[in-house]
Structures are given as structure tokens and as C-alpha cells.
């Protein structure tokens, strides 16, 4: 038999019979606190479960019973933060009441679209038909407009089978809980059973957890391990999204009365590497204030800079809300907003939330997180505002979000893309397949973005040719510095340079420079004349040339030496000793031939054989060492290959 987990919440005004209805449906009294039993009303969240057979399938329904009294609406918000559907409970004798309206608005803000209305106390109603008409009028123009209304009388057991049938029909239409590989559990209870360590409960969303998984508790970034799992008092190896889940966590203590380090109600247990992505105390979101009212009364406008209670999952924390233009958010309006927190909230892009006034007596608005890693004042830029508006218009379309990122920045990294979002890695990968991109290492570039980088590189080289016509090319290091501010990763410069000097890249690299293939270099008559003079100076004694300073007394001679070096006609043994390249090759061959015949030689022996002074030979031999032609071993030099062969033979 296939088991389908779902979470169902009750909602409605105080004393309309929510807990009584849950007990009649499940046989479990969700009121568990002594004070609740004494006062006859729900204060904390209550939980029960209901199994509904459906042919070869079984609907395993976790029911969250939420408090209805105005003083306890914050607990109601915690209860409906992770549900699949709801039962809105309206007493037939009272009708639609203030907390009915507030609970219904909270359901709309959290996008709970699937529901059934239980018309309780139907045996006490003057007219069930009139009660139903009032409810229909209240739910018109909402996703609940066609919701079934089932008259019931829980104490007498009337209508219960009809309600179960309506729930079964509702569950068949309810989409399965999303599995994005990003499991989260919003903690609504914390226990410390003797000998069992810390146990937390909540509704698992976004992915699965299994015994042994590493998890992180936010806020606090506390890491632990799943030691045990239960679902409705049954031990399970794996908890699936949509399950009421108890997690026994190893390595994390319970916070004493919610204070100090540890896990407590309102915290979030995260898996799947979500916590590796950064979060921020600034969140960009769209916020909506409904135009609904109760007997002509509406909640007050949300003012720019107003402090509010931000409810998300089982957490409630203070925040300030800011709007563009600093205008209050009026009834029926929605607007991009910036929310500022004291500590980073454990949000994913796409999460829904509810804003209540700071006294916790009024529900003001609701919204969707669009950018949980926001930067200060970034939302006021036109480009970022367009991004937020695009996300707000398509909150569940991964392709739209990915396309926007690619169009806005020109590049992205598939690894780590939108980690702090409700989108799965599979959704993101599928979205990328339909986009025209170029892969460069770990990055994907939009075709136009990479082309723009190539054009910038080409332009930099051409500009250098125009401003420095005496140079044979642009120094690669200079080109790197010019392009780095435009690259998302410094390592991408090598890929860009490789493409530039490829057979079809239109550029040529010569030692430390790069030039356009069509550029042959040009020197002024003055520098050309100086080049001849420099050649003559070095040719005066080819293997023992004079110090560079002796013939570079003018700017033209300095430019000539730079030109000859870049063309490879000249090498520098030291900054003060320059030789013609063919002379250097001649001296290198002479020294290698001498070492080939002798086997090894001291510097004095090499100097005597070459007939040169130490001024030239010492730095020249050191250069040969660095180039890999020779190696110094004690007072002797040998050809590197012969030294390596000898070392292998001797086992050294």
C-alpha cells in the first residue's frame, strides 16, 4: 500500500470547536497543556494524526490544531507555516468572526490554496443555508471560492463521514510535498527525554532526512547528527517531506528556556548543505497588504521604517520594513520591500511570511522572500529592482530566476547557484539546458557576455599598439590587470588568453607579450637608428659586451633596447649585462661542449676555457642553471642530464 504523507491545519475563531472536531476525527485530544484543559481553549499548537484509506493508497495526515484566541495568533502562524491544506472552522451559530477573518488572511498570505470549511455546531444554527451563504461571500474572489462547506456537529458525530470524504477529495487534488533536496524542519517543540538527548519536532519540508545525516541548526550555525527519527510515534529510517517528524539530534543541546546556545522553538534544522550558503540581515521581498476588512475595519497601513513582527515557519522575530519612495503600503497594494533584522533569518528565496504589528494584535501583511542574501541599498538600483520584480512575478519558475541572473551579470556558476532558494538542483540544471551559454571552467557565460570580454581584450591590445608603436606587443601582465575587474574569477584570464592566441584567435604570444597577428611592429627612424647603435655596441665584443648603462644614455637608446629585448634579438643576463641572442647561444654551446668533454668543471676552469671574466661568466652560468642546462654540485658544474643519470645510478 502506498503511503502519502500530508499536513493539514485547522484555523478559525476561538470556541468554534476546532479541538473538538480534531478529537472527533482522530480520537486524539490536541489540547495537551493543563492550562488548555482547564480553560477549554488551545494556547499552544496541538497535534494529531488521521489515516484515510483510499483504495490501494493510504493518506497519512498530520493535523496541526492551532489556537483561535486573538492573544495566541502568533502560535497559529507557526502552525500553518508548513502545511499542505487547511480546514477552516466556522461555527454555524456565530458565523464569520474577527479571528476567522484574521486566520483566513494568514492562510491567503501563506498561499494555502487547498482547503475545506467545516461548519461546526450546525445543530445550533437558525439557518445552515444562511451561514453557508455568508461564508461563500467572505471567500469570494479567493482561491477558496469553490471550497466545500461541510455542516458538522462533532459532539454528536454528525457529518463526520461527509467531512472525511471531503478531506479525501481535497487530498487527491493537493500537490505532493516538494522534494528539492533541501530538508528543513521548523522546530515547534523541544524535548530532552532522559537518556535520549535532544529531541525536536516539526513538519519536515523541502527534502528527506535519514539517520546519520549531518544537520545544522539556525540561528547559531550549530552542527549535529541525526541519531533517530519518528513519525507519529513510529520509528522510521527516513523522514519524507510532508511528515510530522521528531528528530533525535546528537551534538546539539536544548537551549534552557530558549536562552543561550542550543536549539529551541522557532529555530530551523537544515540539511542538504543549505547552511553553507551565506545569509544576510537584509532581505529583499515583495510585501502585500490585502484589501479585505472586517465589518468595514481594515488593518492600518504599513509605514516605511515601521518595526514589525516577522513570522516565518515557527519563528517570530523583530524586523523593520522599508519601501521605495518611503510611502506607506496601503490596502490592496503590493510592493518590493527591504526587511532589516538584528540577526540573519533562516530564509530561502521563495519562502512566505506574515507581518504583524509590534504589539502582536494585528496581522498587517504577508509576502515572499526574493533575495535572502541582500546587500545594503542594492535594491534601489534599477537593475536589482527589475530582478526583484521579475522574481515576484514568477516566484515558482526556476527558469525565469536563472535567466535573470545570467542576463543581469552575464555569467554564473552552476555549483552553488540559488542554494538559498526553494528550487532543486534538478530544476536549476533543467533551466540551464535551454539557455545559450559558453562553459569556461566552473563558470557559464552568456554568449554576449563572453563576446564582450573578448572584445575588451582585443580593444586593449589594439589600443596598446596605437599608443606604443615601438613595442612588439602588450605585456601579458598588463593585459591581465586591465581585464581582472571585468572577470568574476581571476583564473578565467588564462582561458581568455588561450582563446586569443588560438589558431583562430587573431593574436600571437611572444614570450611575455601578446600582439594582434596583423601587427608587425613599427619603430620610429630615431629608435631604428638607436637599435643599430645598440647592436654595434654589443657586437664590439660579442661574448664580453659593455655594461648596458654605457650606451643607454638617451631615451631613444632605452627604447631601442626594450624593442630588441621584446623581439628576442637581445637577452639580459643581468639588468646591467645584455647580449645579442645569437652571441648568448654561442657562449652556451661553448660551455656545454666543454662540460661534455670534461664531465665536470669549476668556475675557474670554465672561465679559463672561455677566456672571459667572472663579470660575464658567473651570472651567465647561474642563468644556465635556472634554464635547466646545468646544475651546480658543490664547487663543480655538470650538465643537468648527466647529473640526474649519475644520481639515479648511485641511488641518491
Image: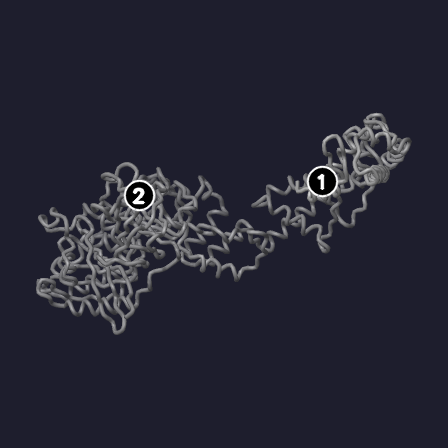
User: Percent from the top left, x then y, of residue 631?
Assistant: 73, 37
Furthest toward the front, the residue is 650
Which SS class for mark 2?
loop
The quadrant holding residue 359 is: top left
The answer, for residue 385, to whether it is visible in the render is: yes
Q: Which residue is more in the foreground, 50 or 252?
A: 252
Labels 2 & 1 near each other (Cβ < 8 A): no
Furthest toward the bottom, the residue is 55
Residue bearing mark 1: 475
User: Percent from the top left, x then y, of residue 148?
Assistant: 23, 67
* Marker count (numbered): 2
Q: Is residue 139 above or below residue 43?
A: below
Name which residue lies at 18% across and 63% down.
118
Q: Residues within 10 Å of mark 2 (few under 14, many from 20)?
A: many
Front position among marks 2 and 1: 2
Residue bearing mark 2: 252
Lateral position of residue 220 relative to residue 443, left or right: left
Name which residue lies at 28% across and 53% down.
228
Amino acid at each position: 500500500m502506498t503511503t502519502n504523507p500530508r499536513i493539514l491545519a485547522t484555523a478559525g475563531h476561538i470556541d468554534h470547536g476546532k479541538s473538538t472536531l480534531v478529537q472527533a476525527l482522530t480520537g486524539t485530544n490536541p489540547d495537551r497543556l493543563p492550562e488548555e484543559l482547564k480553560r477549554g481553549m488551545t494556547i499552544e499548537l496541538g497535534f494529531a494524526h488521521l489515516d484515510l484509506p483510499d483504495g490501494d493508497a493510504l493518506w497519512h495526515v498530520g493535523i496541526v490544531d492551532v489556537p483561535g484566541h486573538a492573544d495566541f495568533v502568533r502560535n497559529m502562524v507557526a502552525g500553518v507555516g508548513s502545511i499542505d491544506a487547511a480546514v477552516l472552522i466556522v461555527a454555524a451559530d456565530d458565523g464569520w468572526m474577527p479571528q476567522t477573518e484574521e486566520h483566513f488572511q494568514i492562510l491567503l498570505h501563506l498561499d494555502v490554496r487547498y482547503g475545506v470549511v467545516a461548519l461546526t455546531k450546525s445543530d445550533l444554527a437558525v439557518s445552515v443555508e444562511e451561514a453557508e451563504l455568508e461564508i461563500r461571500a467572505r471567500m469570494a474572489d479567493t482561491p477558496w471560492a469553490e471550497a466545500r462547506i461541510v455542516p458538522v456537529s462533532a459532539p454528536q458525530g454528525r457529518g463526520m463521514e461527509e467531512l472525511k470524504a471531503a478531506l479525501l477529495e481535497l487530498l487527491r487534488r493537493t500537490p505532493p510535498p516538494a522534494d528539492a533536496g533541501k530538508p528543513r524542519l521548523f522546530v515547534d517543540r523541544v524535548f530532552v527525554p532522559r537518556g535520549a538527548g535532544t529531541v525536536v519536532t516539526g513538519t519536515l519540508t523541502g527534502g528527506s532526512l535519514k539517520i546519520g545525516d549531518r544537520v545544522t541548526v539556525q540561528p547559531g550555525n550549530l552542527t549535529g547528527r541525526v541519531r533517530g527519527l519518528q513519525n507519529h510515534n513510529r520509528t522510521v529510517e527516513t523522514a519524507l517531506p510532508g511528515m510530522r517528524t521528531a528528530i533525535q539530534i546528537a551534538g546539539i543541546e536544548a537551549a534552557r528556556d530558549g536562552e543561550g546556545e542550543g536549539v529551541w522553538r522557532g529555530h530551523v534544522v537544515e540539511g542538504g548543505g543549505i547552511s553553507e550558503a551565506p545569509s544576510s540581515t537584509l532581505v529583499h521581498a515583495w510585501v502585500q497588504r490585502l484589501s479585505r476588512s472586517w465589518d468595514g475595519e481594515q488593518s492600518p497601513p504599513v509605514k516605511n521604517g515601521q518595526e514589525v513582527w516577522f513570522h516565518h515557519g515557527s519563528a517570530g522575530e523583530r524586523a523593520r520594513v522599508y519601501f521605495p519612495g518611503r510611502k506607506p503600503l496601503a490596502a490592496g497594494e503590493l510592493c518590493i520591500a527591504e526587511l532589516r533584522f538584528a540577526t540573519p533569518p533562516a530564509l530561502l528565496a521563495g519562502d512566505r511570511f506574515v507581518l504583524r504589528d509590534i504589539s502582536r494584535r494585528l496581522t498587517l501583511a504577508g509576502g515572499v522572500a526574493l533575495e535572502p542574501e541582500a546587500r545594503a541599498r542594492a535594491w534601489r538600483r534599477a537593475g536589482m529592482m527589475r530582478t526583484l520584480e521579475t522574481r515576484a512575478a514568477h516566484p515558482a519558475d526556476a527558469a525565469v530566476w536563472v535567466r535573470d541572473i545570467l542576463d543581469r551579470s552575464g555569467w554564473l556558476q552552476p555549483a552553488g547557484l540559488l542554494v538559498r532558494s526553494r528550487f532543486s538542483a534538478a530544476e536549476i540544471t533543467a533551466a540551464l539546458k535551454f539557455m545559450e551559454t559558453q562553459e569556461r571552467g566552473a563558470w557559464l557565460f552568456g554568449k554576449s557576455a563572453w563576446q564582450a570580454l573578448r572584445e575588451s581584450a582585443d580593444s586593449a591590445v589594439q589600443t596598446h599598439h596605437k599608443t606604443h608603436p615601438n613595442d612588439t606587443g602588450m605585456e601579458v601582465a598588463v593585459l591581465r590587470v586591465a581585464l581582472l575587474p571585468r572577470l568574476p574569477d581571476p583564473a578565467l584570464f588564462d582561458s581568455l588568453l588561450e582563446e586569443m592566441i588560438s589558431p583562430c584567435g587573431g593574436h600571437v604570444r611572444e614570450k611575455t607579450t601578446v600582439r594582434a597577428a596583423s601587427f608587425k611592429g613599427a619603430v620610429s627612424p630615431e629608435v631604428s637608428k638607436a637599435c643599430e647603435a645598440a647592436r654595434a655596441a654589443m657586437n664590439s665584443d660579442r661574448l664580453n659586451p659593455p655594461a648596458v648603462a654605457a650606451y643607454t644614455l638617451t631615451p631613444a637608446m632605452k627604447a631601442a633596447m626594450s624593442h630588441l629585448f621584446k623581439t628576442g634579438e637581445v637577452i639580459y643576463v643581468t639588468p646591467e649585462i645584455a647580449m645579442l641572442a645569437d652571441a648568448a647561444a654561442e657562449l652556451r654551446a661553448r660551455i656545454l661542449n666543454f662540460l661534455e668533454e670534461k664531465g665536470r668543471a669549476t668556475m675557474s676552469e670554465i672561465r679559463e676555457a672561455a677566456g672571459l671574466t667572472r663579470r660575464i661568466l658567473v651570472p651567465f652560468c647561474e642563468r644556465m642553471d635556472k634554464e635547466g642546462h646545468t646544475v651546480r654540485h658543490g664547487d663543480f658544474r655538470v650538465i643537468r642530464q648527466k647529473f640526474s643519470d649519475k644520481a639515479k645510478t648511485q641511488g641518491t
